[in-house]
Amino acid sequence: MMASMKPEQRQERLAEFVLGKGTATAQELAPMFGVSLMTIHRDLDELAARGVVRKFRGGVTAQPSGVFESNVAYRRKAMLTEKRAIVRVAARHVEPGMSLILDDATTTYHLIAHLERLRPLHVATNFLPAMRELATLRDVGLTGLGGTYDPLHDSFLGVMCVEAVELLRVDAAFVSTSALAGGFAYHQEERIVGVKRAMLEAADRRYLLLDHSKLGRRALHRLVPVSAFDLVIVDAGADEAALAELDRDNVRYEVAEL
């Protein structure tokens, strides 16, 4: 039945499988989908060209590296328990009447579930799924930060987005990023760094929300020193060495219990 699928259908099923598993090899995928290795490599090339996965010798992965960010579909499924714990703590720092800015991180997206009980609020974001969710909330004003739509992140980026952010002044920014080590926060993509920096500049208070998998890692671009944040919120999966590093850097942090 798999072998009789049209290429587009097979590629969709392939994407679902790899995004769910994280990493797979061509050798395991070819018999699973009833096609030759040559065919499966062509399918994986197409998925890689669309930014759904990254190819490596013999297979593909949806997981991030120091140079490549994961596809948003993978990130929205990863570390859900940790992300929900982190935003429960983050919500304690939101009060009715505040203005907020949220980046296009899948961690900060989960904060929206707590905002209706804290209304009235005004929230600005460049993340399309967050815009859709916020638009349904009563007494929560929404500013959509436009720019060039990027399907890999399901968000708006680029110069126009940065300029839209620079027109704002908000009470608090809640952002996440890909890596934190050695006193700096990092991200793989320069265009993401530009938008996040603008968001931090636009806020009176700055909160960094990070699951433990991002601690002790570096990526291609420095975002800002960790000292730029008023508070870092991590989940209880963070190991003692990572927390000790934050202590050495005099970073104020809270640990979210799972």
Image: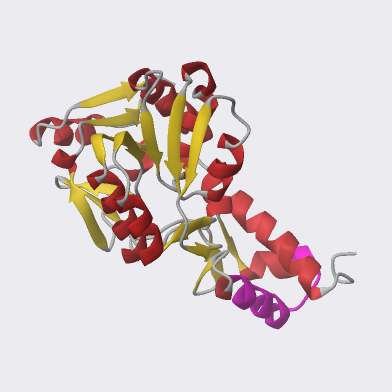
State whether residue 155 is above or below residue 86. below
Tell me what residue is drawn at x 29 percent, y 42 percent. Answer: 215
The quarter of the picture where the C terminus appears is top left
The quarter of the picture where the N terminus appears is bottom right
Q: Position of residue 36 (x, y in %)?
A: 75, 78
Q: Position of residue 21 (x, y in %)?
A: 60, 51
Left or right: 224 as drawn, with respect to 103: left
Q: Is 226 within the magenta?
A: no
Q: Is residue 234 visible?
A: yes
Choose between 96 and 2: the one closer to the eye. 96
The image quadrant that residue 159 belongs to is bottom left
Q: Position of residue 141 (x, y in %)?
A: 50, 33
Choose between 256 and 122: the one closer to the eye. 122
Tell me what residue is drawn at x 29 percent, y 40 percent. Answer: 169
Tell me what residue is drawn at x 69 percent, y 65 percent. Answer: 29
- Residue extent of the magenta highlight: 31-47
Choose between 5 and 253: the one closer to the eye. 253
State whether residue 78 is above or below residue 136. below
Give the color scheme: rainbow, by chain, secondary structure or one colour.
Answer: secondary structure
Left or right: 5 as drawn, with respect to 216: right
The image quadrant that residue 8 belongs to is bottom right
Choose between 256 and 144: the one closer to the eye. 144
Left or right: 10 as drawn, with respect to 116: right
Q: Is 39 within the magenta?
A: yes
State whether residue 133 is above or below residue 153. above
How many marks can you see? 0
State whether residue 200 is above or below residue 36. above
Instruction: Considering the whole magenta stretch, tell me its main secondary structure.
Output: helix
Q: Position of residue 146 (x, y in %)?
A: 47, 57
Tell me what residue is drawn at x 45 percent, y 45 percent. Answer: 125
